[in-house]
Amino acid sequence: MTKRQIHFGLIGCGMMGREFASAAARWFHLLDLDVEPRIVAVCSRTPASMEWFERNVPTVRLATTDYRQLLEDPGVEAIYCAVPHNLHEQFYVDTIQAGKHLLGEKPFGIDLEANRAIVAAARQNPNVLVRCASQFPFFPGAYRIGQWMREGRFGRIIEVEAGFWHSSDLNPHKPINWKRRIATNGEYGCMGDLGFHILYLPLRFGWKPKDVRALLSKIVNERPDRDGNLVPCDTWDNAILACDVETEAQKFPMVLSTKRISPGHANTWFIRVLGTALSAEAMTRNPKQMTWLPYTPGGEQAWRVADVPHQSAYSTITGSIHEFGFSDAILQMFAAFCDELVHGPEMKQPLYCATPKEAAQSHQVFTAALESHRTGQTASVG
Ligand SMILES: NC(=O)c1ccc[n+]([C@@H]2O[C@H](COP(=O)([O-])OP(=O)(O)OC[C@H]3O[C@@H](n4cnc5c(N)ncnc54)[C@H](O)[C@@H]3O)[C@@H](O)[C@H]2O)c1
């Protein structure tokens, strides 16, 4: 099969930039896909952070500290951008206006205003594919729950709970970084950093909160900087949002939680959907396992627990009994972006990457959550 090549430029050579390059490097892991990315250019703030790419990614022909060089390069068709949140607005808007397709990291703008500018640029450039990165719905259990949502298998929704919990910030000696400062991460704090990952699937199925009651907490107020001096750590550590979801057909509660300090949880993403015909839960803590409870009136209420096969959006060489992980989910999300870029709505499978509209809806939820916390009242969303 001849594969259609997509030449990518990568802006931001940190943790996520490396994950993305690594996914591109093992593209042959995927079966039956007629598209293929090639990373030809990289950009980061410091030359040092690009050295790893120059050493490990032989297709890179341009490494620069000025992202505009990538946007001016006719040999770059698409951009993956993973930079601190305060840079999203300028970098994403410039990328879209330069006519480059964009897979941009969440939260897609540091705040609502920045997000609006990005969404407006996307709207003005309909020929550019603009998508927001979020890979967790590509975990096999989550992917299956997404399929069941699409098929309307849950019956009347009783409630939904979704969360994303980290724990490393329990350590007060953990040094400060840009994700712990409002100036670079944004006032949303943990919601901006973790929240889109849990809203993406519910929003895809029209479960946008109508209003929100928020409980936000700051637990560690200072952290050491590089020199060991204590400096303010001013972002929200944890957030619990109680939301009302109202669709044309039904109304139900949805509880969302994003936590930087959830003792023992290294990187736990989960979704739990309870319905009158089916309930189901998937959690990355045990990525092989999912639980579900099909129900018919008067029937038995027994949760089923099973190891799900290694099957996500796109088939891979990995045997079905083997475990799925973070970098597999990145590969699947990246494949969905490339597939959609080349095939549009005719892409191979239905889970396309998150849209600017979905990212905008998440900003409305986080902005309302800040208001709710400030006033102590329920705040309406958007
Ligand atoms: N999808 C996920 O699971 C996931 C996980 C972590 C972070 N993220 C998101 O990815 C993005 C980046 O996070 P990260 O963890 O990779 O951060 P990071 O700090 O590891 O990397 C950020 C990179 O941006 C570069 N940068 C900073 N200023 C720049 C400039 N002016 N020009 C070019 N490059 C510049 C830095 O040099 C660094 O290499 C954020 O939006 C974050 O929310 C997503």
Image: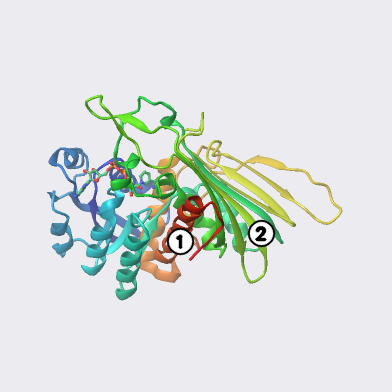
Left or right of 256 in this view: 338: left
Residue at which label 1 appears: 364
- Mark 2, secondary structure of its residue: strand
Q: How was this image coloured?
A: rainbow
> Residue 206, relative to residue 217: is it above or below?
below
Query: From the image, which quarter does the N terminus lie in?
Result: bottom left
Task: Report the residue marked by disc 2.
Answer: 252
Disc 2: residue Cβ within 8 A of ligand 1's nearest atom: no
Q: Does 231 sit left or right of 30 as displayed?
A: left
Q: Position of residue 81 (x, y in %)?
A: 28, 53
Would residue 46 be found to the left or right of residue 245 on screen? left
Q: Badge 1: few (under 14), some or many (20 or more) residues near its Cα, within 10 Å?
A: many
Q: CA distance from mark 1 to mark 2?
A: 19 Å
Q: Secondary structure at mark 1?
A: helix
Question: Which amino acid is tagged 2?
Answer: Phe
Which quadrant of the view contains residue 108? bottom left
* Amino acid type for the residue under numbered disc 1: Gln
Between 113 and 257, the residue placed more toward the observer is 113
